[in-house]
Amino acid sequence: MAETIHIPAGASRAETYEALTPQLKALLTGENDLTANAANFCALMHAAFGFHWVGFYWVRNEELVLGPFQGPIACTRIAKGKGVCGTAWLKNETIIVPDVEAFPGHIACSALSKSEIVVPVINSSAEVMGVLDIDSSELSDFSNADKHYLEKWVAMLSEACHA
């Protein structure tokens, strides 16, 4: 297991994802505990990109329940179809929100959050088992590059945990 990460200075976001992909794989290799892997995933994302909030919500009894995260205190439970997280779960698709104030039904856990990306975590039965939620304090901070890499990364997480 890797105990440190190398974040390339001056790299673009896509270059940073590329450099971190093998490092994430090393973090996940040999560990199949979902909580441990999700916690390291969040720490890696938070350290590398400095996002306001990075965390997971897991599907539990037909609602999303807060899992490992990095950032300020968060909402604990989210109903299916509610907010960006609940909508991503319902639709089983990644959602990029350039301005959270413009998203109908947005759940404001922090007034500092300005944009958001939510990526479903899919298990081996092709069901949504949770979502990765990332909030930025900058408007329009997420792009298709984030979507591409984060979908790849959550698939690596799910596979490592045999979920």
Image (spheres, grey):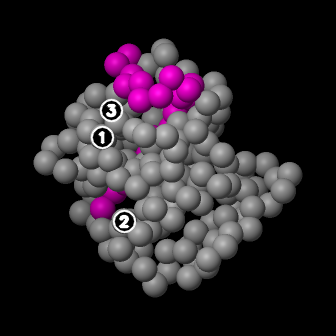
Quadrant of res 25: bottom right
Above or below — where is 4 with respect to 1? above
Above or below — where is 77 with respect to 34? above
Q: Secondary structure at mark 3?
A: helix
Q: List the residue tagged with mark 1.
A: 76
Q: Which residue is at the far right?
A: 10
Q: Earlier in the sequence, mark 2 or mark 3?
A: 2
Cα separation, mark 2 vs mark 3, equals 23 Å
Q: Position of residue 90 (x, y in %)?
A: 27, 37
Q: Position of residue 140 (x, y in %)?
A: 63, 27
Residue shown at 22% from the left, 34% from the top? 79
Q: List the residue tagged with mark 3.
A: 87
Cα separation, mark 3 vs mark 1, equals 16 Å
For the residue pair 105 and 90, the one nearer the viewer reads as 105
In the rendered image, residue 20 lying in the magenta stretch gets the answer: no
Above or below — where is 142 with respect to 70? above
